[in-house]
Image: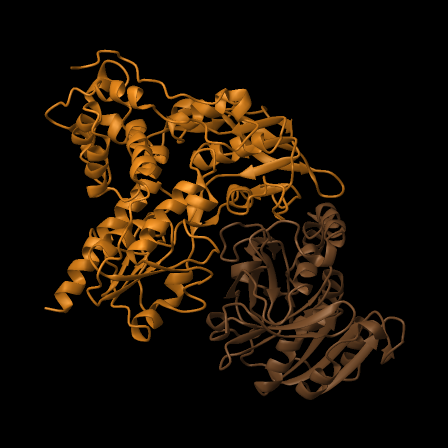
Chain colours: A orange, B brown
Amino acid sequence: MINLVRGKQPMPEQDANVRNQNFEEVSSGYTEDMAIREAMRCVNCRKGTCMTGCPVNVRIPDFIAKVAEGEFEAAYQIISETSSLPAICGRVCPQENQCEGHCAQGKKGEPVGIGRLERFVADWHAEHCGDEKIEPVPSNGHKVAVIGAGPAGLACAGDLINKGYEVTVFESLHKVGGVLVYGIPEFRLPKDIVAAEVAKLEAKGVKFVTNAIVGRAITVDELMDEEGFEAVFIGTGAGLPSFMKIPGENLLGVCSANEYLTRINLMKAYLPEYDTPIQHGDRIAIVGGGNVAMDAARCAKRMGASEVYIIYRRSMDELPARAEEVHHAMEEGIIFKLLTNPVAIKGDEKGFVTGIECVTMELGEPDASGRRKPVVVEGSNHIVPVDMVIMSIGTKLNTLILDTTENLEANEKGGIGTDEGAATNRPGIFAGGDAVTGAATVIKAMGAGKKAAASIDKYIQGLNK
Amino acid sequence: MKRFEVVSKRKLNENMTWLVIYAPLVARKARPGQFIILRTDEYGERIPLTMAGHDEEKGTIDLIYAAVGRTTMLMDQLEVGDCFADIVGPLGKPTHMEGLKKVCVVGGGTGNALAYPLATGMHAAGIEVDMIAGFKNKDLVILEEEFRAGTDNLYMVTDDGSYGEKAFTTDKLKELIAAGNQYDEIIAVGPPIMMKFVCQIAAENNIPSVASLTAYMIDGTGMCGGCRCNIGGEDKFVCVDGPEFDGALVDWDELIQRNTFYATEEADERAHVCRLTGGVRYHD
């Protein structure tokens, strides 16, 4: 039976004016009834175009069919065949550009809520089957090192341990999870979910070494030559935050979104028992329009700011953030100053931020990216009074691994160079995720980690023939 | 030995403590000038500290610190056998030593703890080292024996003359330059305001200078950007581009301003630590 409703089944959410005061998750997710009703909107079209939009090729129509039948654990098993971290992807993937963007139902109404269903299935599994005992996977005797415990590294480690490799993951921070723990806030991705996924990997036998900075404490070459790792996967993430290079950027009260989010998410500045210092701005401007900007803005509101602005130089149509985050941010009272671009940050005599000087933009001809290029409206300079500015305009690649690994080649973007199969120019060294592509998404990084795991398996099996 | 276990603890004076900590992954690659980031426990902040030394064979690193903030006060509560939650390193670039024949290292106050591995490391590398160690007064003097043993010439100065010569480090530096000492480089380690003037004196005498900067930072790998500073008109990150920079290029006024950012919050935290009975946290 098909559910002919054209709109997605809504997910129950905390009221916007309640949730913007706390760090609890925005939505509690579908109930079983809701999930079945939404799953029945899938017409199970023969083409399965949704799958073409998924970087890890989840068998979407098949798992949704199981949800419609009320066979939730069977649905989970289908997703697990290809996705390592469904509870996470269901929450943070930009589904509108991926699976849901290709959904046939989307042509007439809203696409099937694939992300919401994936999340439901993963949460259902955790609740009903989460305490299943996981046995360590017997070793095949081959050691692989994974550098960076973010989405790329976790996905790679997950696939390798399932194949029997002895996997050690090196992480430079004190906690495992990468952007899932330092970047994405609790209200969008509860950290217990990340911890549960990590615990599963540990139970299977993955070793995690925190506080280990590869490139300084130990190099990639040493891991291979001295520590006996036959292959290394580099998934070290995006790297150094970019700034605009406008006057006043080093005033007190200007920081990167990376810094602001790390203080809050990794180091729990919102909880009184943590020592983490943080500035409590009252009027805060976030510069940028991506997911990171939305996260920073929504955190700022929750940290008690009375007015929070998103300052973005293009229009709503070009805003790169995930649609749901923009929608949630607007509901929560974030003020969008679109077609606006900062030209300077103003401060008082002690160096504290007092305002951000902006110009108004209008959209001109399309640029290299195909988006209409924003052009300054002459004489439109104006000052938005704020006491804090958070820069969220992307990142530059960190070169530590490239600088410290013999003859490892970069790609044209400055990231680590790889072929289609995630292999670098050095035999046995593989790379994937933001460290290769520059800032992208969690799911793309996971896709790259999985691809690398397959290549590493092939490489090591080839060596040992 | 457990990871990050305190192996020995020695009080240098009322404020300053020398800890030796088991951290083999850090010790095996540590070089003078590099730093670590530590957390005392799960609730602690991450703070950077330049290493005062290391022993690759024993797998230990040395930290000398003044108990002036919440984290350093909590560090004072750790005894031999206790463990830090986290220590990551070595971070930053090591001190540049190639091509140097004679240098003057100028240490101010607690900065002398950080000057110690630089000065003695350079001396051990065959560089002639004049060391000016400046302190406010006699009670704050540290590491005199170590400096004397590990450098060529040691000049002890205090602001009030209660120990060594009554002089500021800058006065002593001017005097040594005027006396005809030919330095290839002057290295300043101490409060930013002292480093600013030391580097100015170096510039006036056409001598290259190097300053070891401290800044707020979280990860120490370039991710947060909190430690950015203006070096010759360009933004650099202390954690990955430093911590040592050409003293002539540092925007000192901006650096001094940026280092005051959390001053109010830090003062609150200090008051908070003092209320803790026996220094133990009220939560676990």
| Above or below: residue A145 compared with residue A32 | below
Residue toward you, A393 or A300: A300
- Residue A27: x and y in percent read 42, 26
- In the image: residue B23, left or right of residue B254: left
On the image, which quarter does residue B70 sit in? bottom right
> How far from the left and from the top, in percent, is residue A122?
30, 35
In depth, the one of A31 and B176 nearer the eye is: A31
Question: Residue A193: percent from the left, percent from the top?
Answer: 39, 41
Residue A148 falls left or right of residue B149: left
Whole-percent x, y for residue A432 in the image: 30, 52
- Side of A118 relative to B56 (left or right): left
Q: Is residue A181 left or right of residue A370?
A: right
Q: Is residue A145 above or below residue A59?
A: below
Q: Tell me if I can see residue B206 in this picture.
A: no
Q: Is residue B106 above or below residue A153?
A: below
How many marks the image carries: the answer is 0
- Identified at 78% across, 73% down, the residue is B134
Residue at x 26% of width, y 45% of height:
A447
Which quadrant of the view contains residue B211? bottom right
- Residue B243 in sight from this viewpoint: yes
